[in-house]
Amino acid sequence: MPTITLETVIDAPISICFDLSRSIDLHAISTRHSGQQAIAGVTTGLIGYNETVTWRAKHFFLWLNISSRITVFDQPRYFAEEMEKRSFIKFKHERYFEETAEGSIMVDVFNYTSPFGALGIMLDKLFLQKYITALLQKKNRVIKHFAETGRWKSVLKGYSSSPRSYQSKPDRLVLAHA
C-alpha cells in the first residue's frame, strides 16, 4: 500500500490552514483542470466530522465519482478523510497541522490501495503515485497561496479584519479513531 507524505510550511495561522484544507470550494478551485465538482453530500463550504462529499472528476480520460467521509476530526490539529465508494480499494488521507512561530506546518499522509492486484501495483510504480502526489502538491500550493495572500477571505466566512484574529467556527468535539 503506497504512502505519500508531504509537508507544507505556510505563513498563516493554523485555523486558516485547517479550514482551507477542508473547504469544498477551495478544493474545487485547486482541481479545476480535471473538471472536478462536488455533486453530493457537502457541496460547498466546510466539511466536518462524519460528513461526506462525492466528487465527479475526469482522471486518465475517464469520468469518476469518488465519495469520501471525514472519519476523525480534531480541530484545528488533525482530520482524516476516507474513501467510501469506488476508484481505489481503499484510501485514507490524513492532514496534520502544527502552529509555529512563523505560521503553520501542514502534513498530508495519503495511504491508498489500487485495484487490479499486481497490475495495480505496476501502475502505482509507473505513474499513479506520481499523479496523486502532483494533485496533492497542487492543492497544497493553492492552500498556501490563499492563506498567505489574504485570498482565504473569499472562501472562508467568519473572519474579522486580520488573519491573526480569524476564528474558525467550532465544529464538533474532538473525536477518537472509530
Image (spheres, rainbow, N blue to C red):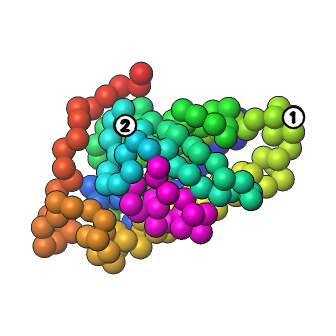
Residue nearest the viewer, comparing 111 with 157: 157
Q: Mark 2 points at which residue?
A: 51
Q: What x and y, as percent, mark residue 13?
A: 27, 62
Mark 2 residue element: loop
- In front: mark 1 or mark 2? 2
Q: Which residue is pictured at 37% across the width and 71% down the height?
A: 146
| Residue 165, above or below 145 | above
Kindly report the distance in space between the C-alpha atoms of the residues bearing marks 1 and 2. Answer: 33 Å
Q: Specify the quadrant that holds the C terminus.
A: top left
Q: Specify the quadrant that holds the N terminus.
A: top right
| Residue 95, above or below 147 | above
- Which residue appears farthest toward the top when viewing the image? 178
Label 1 amino acid?
Ala
Q: Any magenta on residue 169?
A: no
Q: What x and y, as percent, mark residue 166?
A: 18, 62
CB contact under 8 Å: marks 1 and 2: no
Mark 1 residue element: helix
Looking at the rendering, the stretch of residues picked out in magenta corresponds to 22-39
Q: Quadrant of residue 34?
A: bottom right
Q: Is residue 39 left or right of residue 99?
A: right
Q: In which quarter of the image is residue 21?
A: bottom left
Q: Which of marks 1 and 2 is nearer the N terminus?
A: 2
Q: What x and y, as percent, mark residue 159?
A: 17, 64
- Which residue appears farthest toward the bottom when viewing the image? 149
Q: Is residue 44 visible to us here?
A: yes
Q: In this view, does 140 lie to the left or right of 164?
A: right
Q: Which mark is residue 10?
A: none
Q: Which residue is pictured at 16% across the width and 72% down the height?
A: 162
Q: Which residue is pictured at 46% across the width and 67% down the height?
A: 29
Q: Residues within 10 Å of mark 1 (few under 14, many from 20)?
A: few
Q: Name the residue under label 1.
A: 118
